[in-house]
Amino acid sequence: MRYKDISGKEIVNVNRGSRLGILGQTDLEIDEKTGEIHAFIISNYKWFGLKKEGEETKIPWSSIKKIGDDMILIDD
């Protein structure tokens, strides 16, 4: 799967029913040798998404349950 195929999708936690962010506003943890994605790193934004502030949330690839047309469902 390529980044462009998952970019722009909303990340939703199925246990809490909460929206975590949109892929494209996140950083990825990637294995330099294989190119595999290990985790999504979601920053906390303030000021209408213009300023990063606070701690980051790291979502391991193993937590991803489903990648749909519009969203990525995770189970943490």
Image (tube, rainbow, N blue to C red):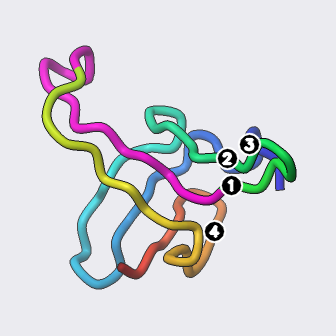
Residue beneath disc 2? 30
Q: Sequence order check: which comes first, mark 1 or mark 2?
A: 2
- In reply to whether residue 49 is colored magenta, the answer given is yes
Q: Sequence order check: which comes first, mark 4 or mark 3?
A: 3
Residue 30 shown left or right of residue 35 in the figure: left
**Crowdedness near tag 2: few (<14), some (14–19) or many (≥20) residues, C-alpha within 10 Å:** few
At x 85%, y 47%, the residue is 33
Mark seen at residue 67 = 4
Residue 28 shown left or right of residue 4 in the figure: left
Image coordinates for residue 60, horizontal then vertical, percent: 50, 66
Identity, as a three-letter code, of the amino acid under mark 1? Ile
- Determine which quarter of the picture holds residue 61: bottom right
Q: Sequence order check: which comes first, mark 3 or mark 1?
A: 3
At x 26%, y 23%, the residue is 49
Residue beneath disc 1? 37
Q: Secondary structure at mark 4?
A: strand
Image coordinates for residue 40, horizontal then vertical, percent: 50, 52
In front of the other: 35 or 47? 35
Quadrant including the N terminus: bottom right
At x 36%, y 47%, the residue is 21
Which region is colored magenta? 38-51
Q: Secondary structure at mark 1?
A: strand
Residue beneath disc 3? 3
Q: Sequence order check: which comes first, mark 2 or mark 3?
A: 3
Mark seen at residue 63 = none
Residue 8 shown left or right of residue 4 in the figure: left
**Crowdedness near tag 3: few (<14), some (14–19) or many (≥20) residues, C-alpha within 10 Å:** few
